[in-house]
Structure formats: structure tokens, C-alpha cells
Image (tube, grey):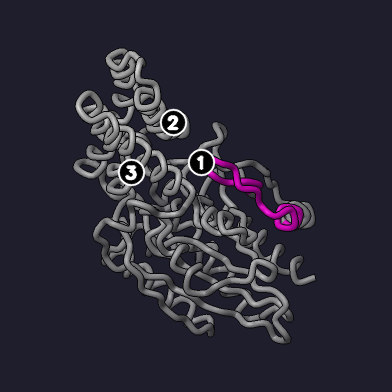
Amino acid sequence: MAEFRHHLETLAVHIGPRGSATKEEEAAAEYVAAQIRSFGLECQRQRFPALTSFSWTYLAIMVTGPLAAALFLFRPGAAFLLALLGSLAYLCEASTFPFFGRLIPKRKSINVIAKAHARSKELRRVLILAHLDSSRAGLSFSPRMVTGFRSSFLLNFLSLPLQALLYGVTLFWPGAPRTALWWFSLLPAAVLLWGCFTLVHRELWGKIVPGANDDASGLAVLLETARVIARSPLLTTSVWFVATGAEESGLWGALHLIRECAFDPKKTMVINLDNLGRGRLTFTFCEGIVFPLRVDPRLIETARETAAEKNLKLDLRPYHLLPTDATAFLARRIPAGSIMAFDERGLLPNWHWPTDTIEHVDEANLAAARDLVLGMLRRLEE
């Protein structure tokens, strides 16, 4: 347990809040690399451009709704195209395919990669992921509003296509009551305007949180798993330990890793470690905030059998909040799943909120997660 505590204190207290593409994220990467080198594994770094916050991306998307409403009475064709563009951009971003995010200025972020090669011929490759950065707090993550996070997200997501539909009616039906349709379209425009306000408020007044649970807990489990595997590599399974950067601002580290490494979906599996510090240990069987992406049954069964063998209490549940690093792999048909922990409400404890501190992390949860990952690796090897 002392090792877990040391990792948590270093990452969430001594380094502290680790915003995406910041010097604090870089310090966390240096710590992870130094720890892995001390286990006898070689490390490499991947540097890549990344956003510092997802707020800018979604602000650029959602503002298209109010702008389209302002244009409609004078330029209905332009309003229709703008709402349609926003709809497509929202779908792409939510599905882990950046659209507007590619156009926004970026800073440098980093991935840390360590490889424990198979002792014999490599038949499969398992990636263990956890992210370096922590998020900025915002109104949407407050204790009062976080329970409705997905509903709010989907309401914003549906508002843009609704506007596009209303404006499209007037283009293809000359006799349509244009003014009445415009008044009706002000409702989804107002929903999007509120979404814009929450994002601006987040950037102006929200503070970057310590990130003990999200995701110093995942990094601690990754490091302690690497310590064991470094001493006893698997025979036919290579294990990659990857600490990703800029996860909280749009999965930029995972997306860069996928582009650079060209993983073979037939030989690759991904176990993502995220928010493990408190609550019921859980393995996701599907992910995705808009459209569900199913986790490979082999991974689900491996998690279930391992938990039963080790007498670990493990839930299986879908995860439909913001995308994880695993979601990026699932969207590209690479087998992946996440190990997480949820409270009695089915929420991530202290998610993106200033209370995400080490006092709210249970080291026993981290030890159970490490045992689950090690057991899954041995079972996949068999």
C-alpha cells in the first residue's frame, strides 16, 4: 500500500493539478518515466500537439446554434448550413474524431511508453493505459448538476440537428411559416447558448483539480503492474505501459498513439485504467456518450473469470459519460475496455471537482485493480 500512497502524493500533491499540455503534466510524465526505468524497463516519449481544454472545441461547435438563429431571418441558407456543420462537428468530436479541434491552436503534450517484450515469440500485445493530466472543474461537474451530465450533453447534441431540420424545411418548402419556425428554433438555440455559458464560466473561474482519482489512481495501478511484469515478463504477450497526455482535453495522447503505432486489431488488446480510487470496481462492457461501442467479449469474460478466481468484487456496466482513452480504440475497432470504480449512484466519485484529492482515494481499491490487471494478463497469456 505504501507504494500506491507514494505515487498518489507525488502526482496529486507535490506536482498537484496537471492541466493538459502544461509543465505539471510534463512533470508527471517525468515521474512516471523515472519510476518505470527504476523497474528495469526502457521508456520512450512521444510528443504531439494538443489542446489545453475541451472547452474551446465544444464552444466552437455550440456557438454555431445561436449564430444560425441570428442569421436565419436574413440568410436562411447560411443558417441551415451553419447548423448542419455544427451537427456534424458535434458528432465527430463525441465519437473521438476531432473536427473543429484540429483547427484550434495547440501546445505540446507527451506520452510515456514502456514495453515489456514477450520472452518468446509475440503472439499478442496488451496495452495498459492511464492518463497523466487532470481536468478543470466546471458547473456541469458540480455535485448538483453532475447527475444530469449525460442528459445535458445529449440535449446539446440534439439541439443542432433540430435547428438544421427547422431551417431546412423553409428551404425546401416555400410556403413554410418561416417566422413561426424561427421562434421555435430559439429554444434549441437557448439550450446551446447556456452550454456556451457553462464552458466560458469553466475557463474563467474553474480551477484545474488535483486529480487524485482522475487519474493519479490509474497511474499508480499502471506503475505497480509494471513493477511486477518487469520482474516476470510474459512468454508470448508483450505488455505496453502507456501514460497518455492530454486525455482530458480530447484524448489527444491516445489518438496520437493510434496514428503512430498502427496497431493490428487481431493481435492488440487495451486495458484502460481510469478513476479507480473509490467505489465499486467495474469493467465496462460498452462505452460512448452518444452511440454505444461494444467491448470485445473476450476482454469481458477475462475480467469476469479473473475476478471470480481472485475473489474480487467486480461489476460489469456500460459507461456513457465523456469518452475515455479506451473509447478512442473502440471507435477504431481495436479491442479495448476500461477498469473504473463507481459510487452508489453509478457516478465517478469527485469527478472533475476540487474534492478529487488523495483523502478520497482508497488504496485497497488500487491494490484490487492491480491484482485484476495482473490476473487478466496471465489469463490472456493462457
Quadrant in the rendering for residue 90: top left
Image location (x, y in percent) of residue 332: 57, 59
> Which of disc 1 and disc 3 is earlier in sequence?
3
Q: Is residue 286 magenta?
A: yes
Quadrant in the rendering for residue 251: bottom left
Mark 3 touches mark 1? (CB < 8 Å): no
Q: Residue furthest front?
A: 174
- Residue at the disc numbered 3: 58
Q: CA distance from mark 3 to mark 1?
A: 14 Å
Q: 220 above or below 230?
A: above
The kind of secondary structure element at disc 1 is: loop
- Badge count: 3
Which residue corresponds to the image point at 42% horizontal and 48% vertical from the top-left? 93
Q: Is residue 289 magenta?
A: yes
Residue sitting nearer the eye, 141 or 320: 320
Which residue corresponds to the image point at 39% horizontal and 26% vertical from the top-left? 172
Give the numbered dot on residue 158: 2
Point out the stretch of residues depicted in magenta: 284-302
| Left/right of residue 249 with respect to residue 263 in the rendered view | left
> Which of disc 2 and disc 1 is earlier in sequence?
2
Q: 106 above or below 207?
A: below
Mark 1 touches mark 2? (CB < 8 Å): no
| Left/right of residue 337 with respect to residue 246 in the rendered view | right
- Residue at the disc numbered 1: 289
Q: Nearer the viewer, mark 1 or mark 2?
A: 2
Image location (x, y in percent) of residue 285: 66, 47
Q: CA distance from mark 3 to mark 2?
A: 14 Å
Residue sitting nearer the eye, 237 or 290: 290
Q: 13 above or below 147?
A: below
